[in-house]
Image (cartoon, grey):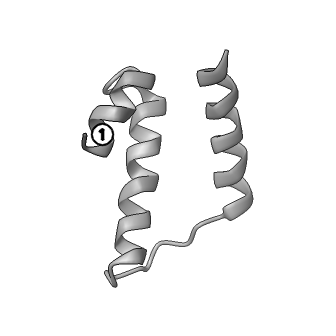
Amino acid sequence: MPFKKRLALLLEKGGSDYNLVVDYYKERNSIAHGGNFISPISMPSVISELKRLHRAVKA
């Protein structure tokens, strides 16, 4: 099952949290597959957001 379909099982498709994860996934794929990585990423911010999403999904 594709990532976005699995994500839609956890988060409302098109919602702000869904879109945030999709954006992170696009950046991850760009980095992993040798794309043009020019956007700065604040890892403390990413980690904080992922922890928040984890708590929300777990609840």
The C terminus: image quadrant: top right
Please name whichever residue, 22 or 1, is drawn nearer the observer in this view of the structure: 1
Residue 5 location, quadrant: top left
Judged from this view, the residue extending furthest toward the front is: 1
Residue 21 location (% of width, % of height): 46, 43
Bin the neighbour count of mark 1 within 10 Å (Cα to Cα): few under 14, some 14-19, many 20 and up: some
Residue 1 location (% of width, % of height): 25, 40
Q: Relative to residue 40, is residue 20 depicted above or below?
A: above
Residue that carries the numbered disc 1 in the rendered image: 4
Residue 10 location (% of width, % of height): 45, 24
Name the amino acid type tagged 1.
Lys
Residue 41 location, quadrant: bottom right
Q: Relative to residue 49, is residue 30 depicted above or below?
A: below
**Element class at badge 1:** helix
Residue 50 location, quadrant: top right
Q: Relative to residue 44, is residue 51 depicted above or below?
A: above
* Residue that appears at 55% across and 72% down: 40
Please name whichever residue, 13 or 7, is drawn nearer the observer in this view of the structure: 7
Residue 47 placement, left or right of 22: right
Residue 27 location (% of width, % of height): 41, 64
Residue 18 placement, left or right of 2: right
* Residue that appears at 41% across and 79% down: 37
Residue 30 placement, left or right of 50: left
* Residue that appears at 36% across and 67% down: 29
* Residue that appears at 38% across and 20% down: 12
